[in-house]
Image (tube, rainbow, N blue to C red):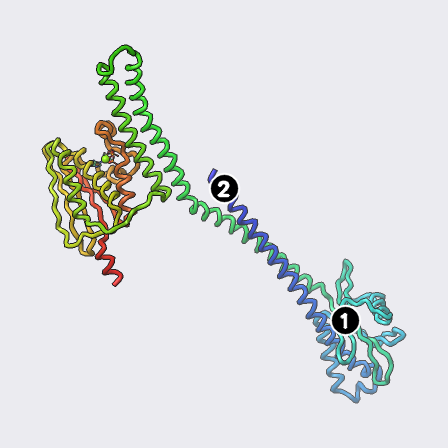
Amino acid sequence: MLNKIRLKLTLINSIVLAAVLIFTFIFVYILLDLNVISNTDNELCENAYQLKRFATLYENTSIQSSNAELHDEYLIYEHKMLSSSRFFGIWDSEENCLISQGNFSVPDNILSAVRDLIFTSQPQAERIIAEADGIYYIHSYSNQSFNVRICTTVFANDMGELRIAQTVSNMNDKNAVTTKLLNILIFAGILGVSVSFGIGYLLSGKAIAPIQQSIKRQKEFIADASHELRTPVTIMRTNLDVVMSSPDESVSSQAEWLDNAYKETTRMEKLINDMLLLAKADLNREKLNMEQIDAAELCRQAVERFNPIAEKKHISIHFNNQTSFSMINGDEKKLDQLLGIIIDNAITYSHNNSNIYVTIENDDNKNVILSIRDEGIGIDQNELEKIFKRFYRTDKARSRREGGTGLGLAIAQWIVQSHGGTITAQSVKNKGTVIITKFSTVEDKKDATS
Ligand code: ATP
Ligand code: MG
């Protein structure tokens, strides 16, 4: 299901990107096209303006030899026009061609149609550019073989006769350039969207990995929890079945079965409470009542509380306080629960007539280090990492016999981490285990802020 969402999100992302790119490319293309057309129009007007100066020159050939400078200018102009795919021509009012040059042919009927338009009262030009020296009319014409822009202006020559100047630009090359640009943009867009899809898919995979992991953990938790709950329910049912099968028997004669069923309800209650705590912790709903606490004093009280339980197994708990400062910020109840979980484990997984050492000290960084060491059964090196996992027990039967549910150390780890501390385990099989927790002291924090 997550993979479908991942694909869907990446697709949506790519579609949005494609839409943005298409919009941008269309905008760029239109802008460029308009710019090219506007530049061409301006150049054509400039060409037409220059052309007007050469009208007299070519109508009156005697000037050609007397005004060599103007003649040279005309030659330069002619060269420039031909090399830039331009056509130019001058006509008299009877539409006789006086000058006409160009490296491409524009059907004369098109040019004369444009000229005719200019003489109508309202010339339907695409653009009209009014300059101090006259009005320039811009038209565009296209068919399969050519696509031109025509600038037409009417003026009077030196003799006061009406003349028409036309400059024409072949737009085929320019259109080819803009079309090429459009093709490049489309190709770049398709490539960009494809690459973005690929990278997006990979990155979204990385982004959803923690979610996948969390869903997997949730599923495992539900499976484990159901399994753990099934056992006490089965035991209760079996024992109550026995009781139900002899309804005439007295309660005292059925005490053994009832006691078994009762023990299982206690186990179930502990299991449900532990599960509830972890579920709340996962949802960040388990609030901590933070206050300044003397960690050494809290340890001393916990040791005192567990002494009678340890004595039942002839285990001695040795408490050693080596701290110079032991004030920490924490939730007293939760920290007490943490100590209870670790000391309870130390007693549970220790042999009779052994020792447990509870030591609290400071390290060089003024942290409080609390270590609870036992001489018990120990834990295999390859299992050491797993003991903090929910429901993990190295010896399920033994843990169950002792009333364990396998959630103690998972809760302990959450308590420590929610206090900004660390918890680690070291162990040698058949030699013993030490659980070490580290918290920063309040003095430490004060030092850090000062
Ligand atoms: P409960 O949740 O009721 O405490 P539990 O003791 O089985 O049940 P944890 O406290 O989470 O669960 O401990 C997990 C497992 O780690 C235990 O089942 C045990 O195998 C191992 N373990 C924990 N502490 C010790 C220890 N001091 N010595 C040896 N094994 C230990
Ligand atoms: Mg335990």
| Residue at mark 1: C-beta within 8 A of ligand 1 | no
In terms of secondary structure, where does tag 2 sit?
helix
Identify the residue at the far right of this view. Answer: 94
* Residue 128 numbered mark, or none: 1
Residue 169, horizontal then vertical, whole percent: 74, 69
Label 2 sits on what residue type? Ile
Position of residue 416 in the picture relative to residue 23 (left or right): left
Residue visible at 75% across and 67% down?
Answer: 149
Position of residue 359 in the picture relative to residue 450 (left or right): left
Residue 214, horizontal then vertical, whole percent: 38, 40
The residue under label 2 is 5
As measured in the structure, the alpha-carbon distance from the residue carrying label 1 to the one carrying label 2 is 57 Å
In terms of secondary structure, where does tag 1 sit?
strand
Of residues 435 and 198, which is closer to you in this image? 435
Q: Image quadrant of ligand 1?
A: top left
User: Is 273 drawn above or below residue 116 in the view shown?
Assistant: above
User: Is 356 drawn above or below residue 58 in the view shown?
Assistant: above
Residue 57, horizontal then vertical, whole percent: 80, 83
Label 1 sits on what residue type? Ile
- Badge 1: few (under 14), some or many (20 or more) residues near its Cα, within 10 Å? some
- Mark 1 or mark 2: name the one nearer the start of the chain: 2
Q: Quadrant of the C terminus?
A: bottom left
Residue visible at 62% across and 56% down?
Answer: 183
Of residues 186 and 124, which is closer to you in this image? 124
Residue visible at 69% across and 64% down?
Answer: 173
User: Is 296 drawn above or below residue 365 in the view shown?
Assistant: above
